[in-house]
């Protein structure tokens, strides 16, 4: 069992490292051809802009000499239009590629999430995991197109602009670099603050998702407890954290914007003052000064692009780190295609001195659990709450692995079974009988997608669900709501049992599968289970007389140990714990059932 816990990314500790670049490279590599092509077009578009100041200088020189301006103006218009078209194509290609990168990242994350070990998911907040698939992957768009491509393009454009400015006038270039360099020092101190605030905002968004998932996952309980205002405060606190981090980022970004604006204005005034003096002294022409000033305005966006790219890389590093945490979680070897099961014979189950604990620091749940269940028939597990009954089922399904000992299915250690083949042989009804959002048909065929209408009709009849289907407006194609909210508790249990039976399993695990059924439906389902036990092995966790007494054998568990195995009559006579449970729960009272919840 994995005992790995995944703490939230600490924004102040996330840095752009070699691992960041390596991870980023994995996302970019499949699209490197189109990214390079789009980047090349973007660079050409940017460089065509550098021709415009020269073209403007030619126009001014021709104007001063009284020459015809037609050719120069046509050239200038052509350069402007060509640059705009090329830049637009580049922008579209890179944006499209960025969406492809996000799609691939999300598919890969979903693929991994569905194959994680149960322990890995239980150690995480579901809302935070969803945030990694949605919000964090969205940040890859900024990193792949804006940070990497735009940053690289901005660097090349900056160098080309400096070269062109140096050809115009070296002195004015020195004045420009001096002013911008001073501003750059200020920006260098501001950038880490922007990165930190932005990454804190990411973490806060994940907390919002986790808080909302907590509320929506127990929505009726929240309302029944009158806890709306308290939960609102908790979600509001997470939202307040995101707001505060966003405001901090906005404050620093505004400061950068003001600083960049001042850099443009001061540089413009300095160049205009020094350049004007040089023009007055006939050291340079007015057309050269104008061209230089145009280059100055091309220089600033390039610097801003580089600064933005560095900031986005910091943000991307946090996103990549959070995505990487999911990639480091322990996975199961689940096949990518459904596993068909040819063997239809009942399965035998053996526990051999099984020890188990959920975490090394916690006490054992199982202490040397041993029992043998032959193929076919029905076995009931009884015992006080916390005795380890449900854990037996989780270990058979390999949701967890035993600390020591062996669990055998047909004499073969379940650890040696391919996990897809193992679970294809098992039908499992959980204690809370979950129903998924979607139609009733989708829920029934969830474990048997190839089931035909005749098989569905048969299982509906066996589980007394046909009357429910007749009442639904669209029959089995009716949407049952989030977590089956349009069904009663008993109906959800019967749907879960029908879903398991439709798989025609070799081993059927029922964990309190009749706890919410009324007497009539419980009796019908009991007959269905008895019928299934003639062709499959049925294991059931139960407390009711009607279920326990019909079992071929009963395994009594207490404090993680098997205290006795036998029939109802044998155990009442020989096992004190079972006799006490039977008396307490009316199991020895000649057929008086425990109170039930109506379906």
Image: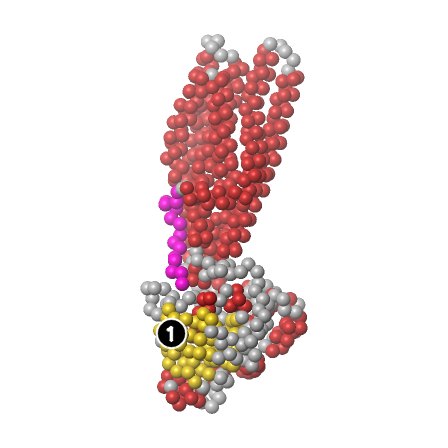
Q: Find residue 199 and report its horizontal and vertical position in percent.
A: 42, 45
Q: Identify the colour scheme used.
A: secondary structure
Placement of 195 over or under 203, stated as above or below? above
Q: Is residue 491 left or right of residue 13?
A: right
Residue 495 visible in this rendered orientation of the protein: no
Q: Residue at x 52, y 39 (%)?
A: 145
Q: Which residues are magenta?
A: 1-15
Q: Is residue 297 left or right of residue 96?
A: left
Q: Residue at x 52, y 16 (%)?
A: 288
Q: Find residue 153 and report its horizontal and vertical position in percent.
A: 51, 32
**Which quarter of the figure is the N terminus placed in?**
bottom left
Does 70 appear in magenta? Answer: no
Q: Find residue 571 and report its horizontal and vertical position in percent.
A: 41, 87
Of 4 and 257, the residue lying toward us: 4
Q: Residue at x 52, y 49 (%)?
A: 105
Figure quadrant of residue 558: bottom left
Q: Which residue is mark 1?
A: 353
**Which quarter of the figure is the C terminus placed in?**
bottom right
Figure quadrant of residue 214: bottom left
Residue 144 visible in this rendered orientation of the protein: yes
- State the SS at label 1: strand
Placement of 308 over or under 487, stated as above or below? above
């Amino acid at each position: 069992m994995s005992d790995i816990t995944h703490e939230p990314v600490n924004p102040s500790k996330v840095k752009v490292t070699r691992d960041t670049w390596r991870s980023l490279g994995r996302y970019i590599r499949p699209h490197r051809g189109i990214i390079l092509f789009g980047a090349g077009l973007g660079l050409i578009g940017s460089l065509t802009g550098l021709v415009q100041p020269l073209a403007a200088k030619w126009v001014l020189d021709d104007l001063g000499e009284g020459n015809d301006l037609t050719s120069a103006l046509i050239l200038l218009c052509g350069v402007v239009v060509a640059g705009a078209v090329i830049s637009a194509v580049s922008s579209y290609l890179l944006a499209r590629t960025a969406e492809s990168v996000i799609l691939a990242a999300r598919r890969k994350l979903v693929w991994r999430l569905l194959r994680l070990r149960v322990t890995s998911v239980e150690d995480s907040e579901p809302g935070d995991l969803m945030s990694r698939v949605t919000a964090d992957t969205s940040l890859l768009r900024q990193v792949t197109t804006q940070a990497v491509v735009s940053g690289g393009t901005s660097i090349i454009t900056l160098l080309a602009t400096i070269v062109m400015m140096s050809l115009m006038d070296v002195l004015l270039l020195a004045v420009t670099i001096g002013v911008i360099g001073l501003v750059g020092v200020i920006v260098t101190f501001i950038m880490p603050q922007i990165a930190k605030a932005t990454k804190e905002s990411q973490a806060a968004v994940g907390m919002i998702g986790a808080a909302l998932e907590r509320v929506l996952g127990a929505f009726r309980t929240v309302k029944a407890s009158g806890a709306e205002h308290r939960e609102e405060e908790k979600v509001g606190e997470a939202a307040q954290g995101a707001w505060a981090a966003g405001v901090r980022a906005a404050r620093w970004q505004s400061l950068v914007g003001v600083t960049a604006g001042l850099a443009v204005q001061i540089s413009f005034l300095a160049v205009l003052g020094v350049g004007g003096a040089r023009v007055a002294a006939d050291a340079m022409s007015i057309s050269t000064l104008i061209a230089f000033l145009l280059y100055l305005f091309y220089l600033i966006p390039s610097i801003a692009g580089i600064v933005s790219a560095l900031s986005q890389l910091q943000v991307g590093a946090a996103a990549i780190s959070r995505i990487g945490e999911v990639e480091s979680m322990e996975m199961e070897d689940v096949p990518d295609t459904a596993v068909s099961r040819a063997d239809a014979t009942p399965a035998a189950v053996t526990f051999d001195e099984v020890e188990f604990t959920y975490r090394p620091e916690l006490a054992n749940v199982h202490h040397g659990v041993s029992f043998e269940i032959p193929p076919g028939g029905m076995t009931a597990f009884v015992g006080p709450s916390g005795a380890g009954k449900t854990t037996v089922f989780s270990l058979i399904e390999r949701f967890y692995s035993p600390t020591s000992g062996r669990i055998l299915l047909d004499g073969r250690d379940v650890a040696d079974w391919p996990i897809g083949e193992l679970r294809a042989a098992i039908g499992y009804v959980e204690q809370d009988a979950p129903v998924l959002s979607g139609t009733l048909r989708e829920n029934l065929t969830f474990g048997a997608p190839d089931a035909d209408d005749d098989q569905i009709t048969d299982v509906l009849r066996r589980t007394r669900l046909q009357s429910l289907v007749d009442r639904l407006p669209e029959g089995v194609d009716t949407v049952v709501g989030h977590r089956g909210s349009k069904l009663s508790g008993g109906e959800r249990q019967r749907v879960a049992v029908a879903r398991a039976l439709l798989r025609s399993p070799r081993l059927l695990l029922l964990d309190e599968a009749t706890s919410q059924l009324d007497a009539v439906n419980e009796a019908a389902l009991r007959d269905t289970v008895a019928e299934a036990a003639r062709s499959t092995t049925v294991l059931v966790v139960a407390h009711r007389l009607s279920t326990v007494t019909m079992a071929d054998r009963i395994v009594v568990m207490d404090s993680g140990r098997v205290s006795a195995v036998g029939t109802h009559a044998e155990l009442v006579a020989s096992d004190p714990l079972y006799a006490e449970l039977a008396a307490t729960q009316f199991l020895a009272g000649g057929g008086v059932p425990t109170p039930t919840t109506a379906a």
